[in-house]
């Protein structure tokens, strides 16, 4: 995160009445306006089981919900790939003026 100039803050929340644990990860370039919430529990052998991953980017009204980390990574690659394609599609005005 720091290599890409992103600030972040992480919090751990353990609800008292449910067996699920909650981990909140906030990140952003200038403000912490992106959020990932991971709800997980433990199996009877002690391994972690991810139940749900909620992602809200730039104050989205409805979070994107994923079951696995692979689905989350695929979504983030496609979401951040759109910005790269838009920047490449727009030619610089200074190169055309000669």
Image: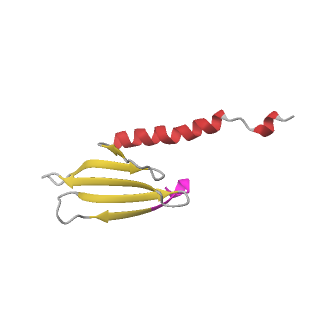
Q: Residue at x 49, y 55 (%)?
A: 1
Image quadrant assignment for residue 89: top right
Describe residue 66's horizontal placement relative to residue 43 as left or right.
Answer: right
Name the residue: 16% across, 51% down: 43
Question: Residue 15's spot in the image, x, y percent?
Answer: 22, 64
Residue 2 forms part of the magenta stretch: yes
Q: Position of residue 6 (x, y in %)?
A: 52, 57
Instruction: Write the start and end of the magenta stretch as one range.
Output: 1-8
Q: How many marks?
A: 0
Residue placed most toward the observer, 73 or 79: 79
Considering the image in quadrants, where does the C terminus appear? top right
Quadrant position of residue 74:
top left
Image vertical order of residue 84 relative to residue 60, above or below: above
Q: Is residue 95 left or right of residue 73?
A: right
- The percent position of residue 51, horizontal first and vertical second, equals 24, 48
Residue most toward the front? 61
Going 40% across and 42% down the picture, which residue do you hit?
Answer: 73
Q: Where is residue 72 shown, x and y percent of the image?
A: 38, 43
Farthest left residue? 44
Q: Relative to residue 46, is residue 22 drawn left or right?
A: right
- 41 lies left or right of 27: left
Q: Which residue reaches farthest bottom?
A: 16
56 inside magenta stretch: no
């Amino acid at each position: 995160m720091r290599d890409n100039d992103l600030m972040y803050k992480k919090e751990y929340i353990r609800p008292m009445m449910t067996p699920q644990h909650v981990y909140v990860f906030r990140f952003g370039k200038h403000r912490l306006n992106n959020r990932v919430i991971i709800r997980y529990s433990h199996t009877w052998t002690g391994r972690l089981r991810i139940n749900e991953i909620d992602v809200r980017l730039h104050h989205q009204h409805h979070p994107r919900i994923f079951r696995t980390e692979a689905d989350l990574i695929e979504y983030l690659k496609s979401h951040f790939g759109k910005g790269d394609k838009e920047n490449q599609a727009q030619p610089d005005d200074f190169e055309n003026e000669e």
